[in-house]
Amino acid sequence: MATFEIIMPKLGESIIEATITRWIKQPGDMIAEDDAIVEIATDKVDSEIPSPVEGKLIKHLFQVGDVVAVGTPIAIISLDGSDEVSEAAAEVAAAPTEVPFVPEPTSPKEETTIPESGRFYSPLVKSIAREEGISIAELDKIAGSGKDGRVTKDDVLDYLKSRGTVLPAVQPIQAVQAPQPAKPAVARAEAPKVTSESGDTIVEMDRMRRLIADHMVMSKQVSPHVTSFIDVDVTNIVNWRNKVKDSFQKKEGEKITYTPIFFEATAKALKEYPQINASVDGYNIILRKNINIGMATALPSGNLIVPVIKNVDEKSLLGITKNVNDLAARARANKLQPDEIQGGTFTITNFGSFDSLTGTPIINQPQVAILAVGAIRKQPAVIETSYGDVIAIRHIMILALAYDHRVVDGALAGMFLKKMKDLLEGFDPERSI
């Protein structure tokens, strides 16, 4: 019988394993080419694995909750529809589900050997242990919160906090650094004890909501947040969009929203003020060469994900529009790849989607600022003319910039917002696309 093995795919440069969260197809199900077979989760994004072949699914090689290394077979498909498993496939199916760890190549200077242990550790846990110099003896002492007492990434990171090791917020740069003064550890505030009462409903956070919660708390602890606001007259933009949206959709098969215009203006402002397009590494400020803007996107589940449009400053408005529409659609359909939510240098979030005037967003670490776009509303405004001041109905929007006060001061934030105001108010209503 001819069989085909479904392999755990490589989902990004930094992804070495994934967790099986749901089997969409069960043994005995007929599979068409491109049918989604299984849902998997990494610490970056949830994804579905499609089948590259058609046939009958005859074997799951892992269970829900199992952590599987990239490149490992996870299911067997019979190409001729037979229920029999070939001898070779049977050997794969009978193999232990705990995949041996293959360490990534490192320089001799950095390598820390993790010897064999009677306890199973996932590739990600071993990788963290190797990088942080945790011996196997130390690893064996860590209490595991995962399935069957397995040590998870979070268990190791919690251990490192109590061990006195601080993980870097961003990837280290290859540079000779001056000795850094010792920094006191910042204790994490203890959450108050909460008790449920009769009639309350307890809903456990799903995996993505837990990641969001931890990321938001971490960002508030890492960065002293300050938020500045400015109002913008976007009447020219509103009138232009109303004029071109029907012809644009007919010609390009795409809807044009305000978001691509905001992205284009933001990229121009970031080029003029590169200190906003930055990250902090200890006492070093990393000014990013690329302008990769994240787009905070609400999911049907109520969770949030931030796909990233790379090199926005190099794209036309049409190119940005297509990127925005594609990423937003695939984000809501759970079709994003891990690489598409990584590498952001700045983030935009649209409070106006829910008719909110403005808000104070939380910085998406390791970035140093995030821009919130409010709802566009008709308001009376004073217009200066050569004949004197007049009051007219204009479309007004509030921009809010939350920034890391360690490296961005109010003056810099104000200049950036003023540049955004000038760019948006100066939009050419006769512009072609």
Image (cartoon, helix red, strand yellow):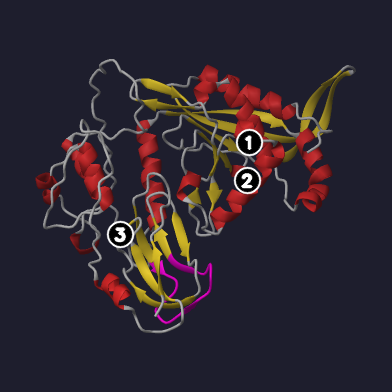
Q: CA distance from mark 1 to mark 3?
A: 37 Å
Which of disc 2 and disc 1 is earlier in sequence? 1
**Percent from the top left, x then y, of residue 409?**
48, 19
Q: Type of residue at label 3?
A: Val
Mark 2 nearby-residue class (10 Å; few <14, some 14–19, many ≥20): many
In the rendered structure, are the residues bearing label 1 and label 2 in contact, judged by CB atoms less than 8 Å apart? yes
Q: Kindly identify the residue that appears in the image at 18 percent across and 34 percent down.
A: 164
Quadrant occupied by the C terminus: top right
Q: Nearer the viewer, residue 249 or 85?
A: 85
**Percent from the top left, x then y, of residue 93?**
29, 72
Residue 355 visible here? no
Which of disc 3 and disc 2 is earlier in sequence? 3
Reading the image, the residue beneath label 1 is 263
Reading the image, the residue beneath label 3 is 67
Q: Kindly identify the residue that appears in the image at 31 percent across and 64 percent down.
A: 65
Q: Type of residue at label 2?
A: Val
Up-down relation of residue 270 to residue 302 (above or below) = above
What residue span does the magenta drawing correspond to? 22-38
* Marker disc for residue 227: none
Residue depth check, mark 1 versus mark 3: number of the one nearer the observer? 3
Q: Tell me the SS state at disc 1.
A: helix
Q: Type of residue at label 1?
A: Phe
Q: Is residue 26 magenta?
A: yes
Up-down relation of residue 64 to residue 71 (above or below) = below
Residue 232 visible here? yes
